[in-house]
């Protein structure tokens, strides 16, 4: 991990990862996007709704409000109750924001996140003028809960191949002065598009350095999110290697998990292959609706030796990231 830069008051970091396999970097991105424990709004009860939104969309909009509480704040998550009670105005339209939700049961009142950069409340919906039944309106009750997966703490988690300046210069000159040099070539075509091919690579022609960017929605600083993502990755490897190993009649070893998929499968495949202890390795992530990771490999040494090597190499990668955070 190199060239770490922090911006946006700690809510964004940019850094480089070098000499790491592509599936490791992509797995880190996937975990950041959807597998960081996140406090969300749950148990939404709509008691009244005369807006143009149907109940399903109103519930969805409530549950999408970002919560300014970390998963470690167990007491706040357990005790907090949210309520929105609004009658339509007979005179003017009314814009409802996140500030109009009443928080009770908790010592904290700022449980709903404001705009991270402006500090202003978030737009929720607009109530139109009038209504035949003034006692009706928007009445919503909700609580908080923690999602271990499926919710996100980031608005940006992405990476790209790092551009090799020397190779980019050579490729640019080749583009401008090579075949068809007499044609009027626009340098912007190379600078904005073709330069992506000029990435830093290893002796096998594979990308070996990556530019990574993480931007938090504003609850957890970006450095902490990276640390949490690596810790989740570590647990995935540890729990996966606790699964039993089976062997088929043709000498193929396999290990299965009903909770993992591409994130761990691709990572395990590339590390086991690069170890040189196997002559075949593959993974099957199962069906998207029924995840079941099956890792298969053929080796002349003990299967435990192969998996222990995978554990060692994986943990070394994780530790290298944690030391740089």
Image (cartoon, rainbow, N blue to C red):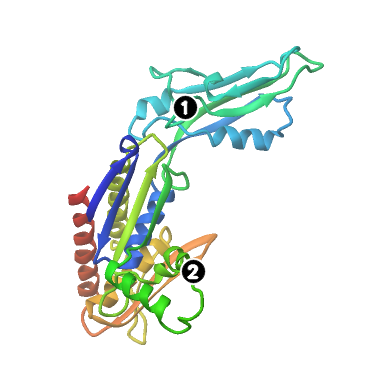
Viewer-side residue, 31 vs 200:
200
- Residue 302 lies, with reference to residue 153, above or below; the image says below
Whole-percent x, y for residue 282 in the image: 38, 76
In the image, residue 297 above or below residue 9: below
Q: Is residue 103 something one can see in this rendering?
A: yes
| 121 vs 181: above or below | above
Q: Identify the element where label 2 is drawn.
A: loop
Give the class, few, some or many, for how many residues have Cα within 10 Å of label 2's Cα (few <14, many ≥20). Answer: few
**Relative to the observer, which residue lies in front, 154 or 136?**
154
In the rendered structure, the answer to whether residue 92 lies left or right of residue 280 reads right
**Number of marks drawn:** 2
The CA span between labels 1 and 2 is 49 Å
**10 Å crowding of disc 1: few (<14), some (14-19), many (20+):** many
Residue 191: name its quadrant.
Answer: bottom left
Q: Relative to 316, is 251 on the left or the right?
A: right
Q: Quadrant of residue 56?
A: top right
Q: Is residue 240 visible?
A: no
Give the image quarter of residue 117. top left
Residue drawn at point x = 43 percent, y = 19 percent: 109
Q: Pointer 1: what residue?
A: 112
Which quadrant would the N terminus be assigned to in this image? bottom left
Residue for point 42% across, 38% down: 217
- What residue would you read off at disc 2? 186
Q: Which residue in the rendered view is the most extreme toward the right? A: 132
The residue sitting at 38% across, 79% down in the picture is 174
Mark 1 against mark 2, which lies toward the viewer? 2
Query: Where residue 146 sits in the image (x, y, percent)?
Result: 43, 37
**Which of the labelled discs sits on residue 284, or is there none?**
none
Earlier along the polypeptide chain: callout 1 or callout 2? Answer: 1
Q: Secondary structure at mark 1?
A: loop
């Amino acid at each position: 991990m190199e060239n770490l830069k922090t911006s946006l008051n700690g809510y964004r970091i940019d850094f480089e990862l070098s000499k790491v396999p592509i599936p490791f970097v992509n797995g880190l991105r996937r975990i950041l996007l959807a597998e960081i424990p996140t406090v969300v709004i749950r148990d939404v009860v709509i008691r009244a709704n005369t807006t143009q939104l149907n109940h399903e969309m109103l519930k969805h909009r409530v549950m999408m409000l970002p919560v300014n509480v970390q998963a470690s704040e167990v007491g706040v998550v357990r005790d907090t109750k949210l309520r929105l009670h609004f009658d339509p105005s007979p005179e003017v339209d009314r814009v409802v924001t996140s500030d109009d939700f009443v928080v009770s049961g908790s010592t904290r009142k700022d449980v709903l996140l404001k705009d991270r950069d402006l500090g202003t409340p978030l737009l929720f919906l607009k109530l139109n003028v009038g209504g035949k039944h003034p006692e009706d309106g928007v009445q919503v009750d909700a609580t908080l809960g923690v999602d271990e997966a499926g919710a996100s703490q980031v608005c940006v988690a992405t990476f790209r191949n790092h551009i090799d300046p020397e190779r980019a210069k050579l490729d640019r000159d080749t583009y401008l002065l090579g075949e068809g040099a007499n044609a009027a070539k626009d340098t912007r075509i190379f600078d904005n598009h073709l330069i992506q091919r000029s990435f830093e690579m290893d002796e096998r022609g594979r990308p070996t350095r990556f530019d990574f960017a993480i931007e938090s929605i504003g609850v957890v600083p970006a450095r902490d999110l990276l640390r949490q993502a690596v810790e989740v990755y570590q647990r995935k490897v540890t729990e996966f290697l606790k699964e039993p190993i089976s062997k088929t009649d043709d000498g193929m070893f396999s290990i299965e998990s009903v909770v993992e998929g591409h994130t761990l499968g691709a990572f395990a495949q590339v590390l086991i292959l690069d170890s040189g202890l196997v002559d075949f390795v593959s993974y099957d992530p199962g069906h998207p609706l029924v995840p079941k990771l099956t890792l298969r490999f053929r080796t002349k040494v003990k299967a435990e030796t192969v998996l222990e090597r995978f554990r060692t190499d994986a943990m070394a990668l994780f530790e290298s990231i944690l030391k740089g955070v």
